[in-house]
Image (spheres, helix red, strand yellow):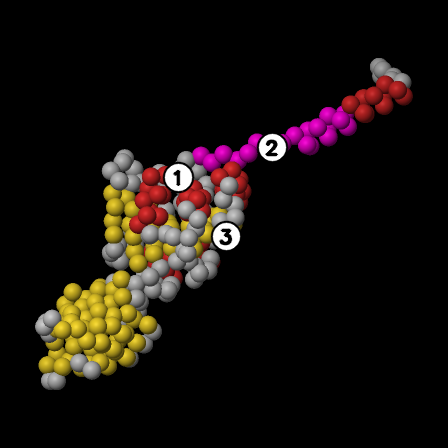
Amino acid sequence: MSVGRSASQCLSILTFSAIALCAFAQAPSAEFTPEVGQSGKDVVWVPSPQELVDKMLDMAKVTPKDYVIDLGSGDGRTVITAAKRGVRALGVEFNPDMVALSKRNAAKAGVSDKASFVEADIFRTDLSSATVITLFLLTDLNLKLRPTILTLKPGTRIVSNTFRMGDWEPDQTVELGCDTYCTAYLWIVPARAEGHWKTAQGDLMLKQEFQKVSGTLNSGNAAVPISRGSLRGARISFTAANAEYRGRVNANTIEGTVNSAGKSAAWKATR
């Protein structure tokens, strides 16, 4: 048996339904809250301890003149911490929910003018403008990034939470002594110095393994091995035939000083 309704009753029901539907559509959705261990494109998300974030930026000696890029920026804490120091910083994150969360966190911290975030693949991101790159990735991902990192401007600082760069030894290591994820590593991108150089002292043959330099200085008929060879960004130093050489690599030129027997003189090499 069917039950009939008056026109006014039907209109009331329709009006109530429309209001309820509208209210439902306008109800705010719950904000995304990340969970430790949630899966991502390449790694699970685990936040860096704030103390380690601070230490990483200290090791990189960031200043307002720097531009920091954080690869796999998560909830944005590294970028926001850098921005609070007056540094322009960019977070690169694949998860759009994390990007949105980071932007909200930056706004709450009052640093949206310094901190920015993009939804992007870290392996397809242009890093050439960075002076500092921060990482909390796995070793195999660091190794995948390493060839690109080594093409960056000499002196670019790379800081990683916990995970290393394979056989590229860090320039500095700091242990905080907490339970997990408490080690920070710093690398400084070295200039490309390997090759055959001409100097007033003779032919200089350099071999390079990241920031370590070896080789010989051919003076007259003798090939003198160099020792204590190192690169720190564009700055090179080594010892040969009891003389200490220091200089700055600029593409195919090295200019600096050589100190021997207490006397200092200008030194230049070209290749």
Q: CA distance from mark 3 to mark 2?
A: 25 Å
In this image, 74 relative to 167: left or right? right
Q: Secondary structure at mark 1?
A: loop
Picture residue at 33% right of the left edge, 52% below the top: 60
Q: Are marks 1 and 3 in contact (CB under 8 Å)?
A: no
Mark 3: amino acid:
Ala
Q: Residues within 10 Å of mark 2 (few under 14, many from 20)?
A: few
Q: Secondary structure at mark 3?
A: loop
- Is residue 27 in the magenta section? yes
Picture residue at 17% right of the left edge, 81% below the top: 201
- Residue 145, x across and y down, in percent: 37, 57
Work out whether 68 lies above or below 97: below
- Residue 221, x across and y down, in percent: 11, 84
Q: Residues within 10 Å of mark 1 (few under 14, many from 20)?
A: some
Q: Which residue is mark 2?
A: 29
Residue toward you, 85 or 179: 85
In this image, 202 relative to 1: left or right? left
Q: CA distance from mark 1 to mark 3?
A: 19 Å
Residue toward you, 141 or 75: 75
- Is residue 28 in the magenta section? yes
Quadrant in the picture for the N terminus: top right
Magenta segment = 17-35
Q: Which residue is mark 3?
A: 120
- Residue 247, x across and y down, in percent: 25, 70
Quadrant in the picture for residue 265: bottom left
Mark 1: amino acid:
Pro
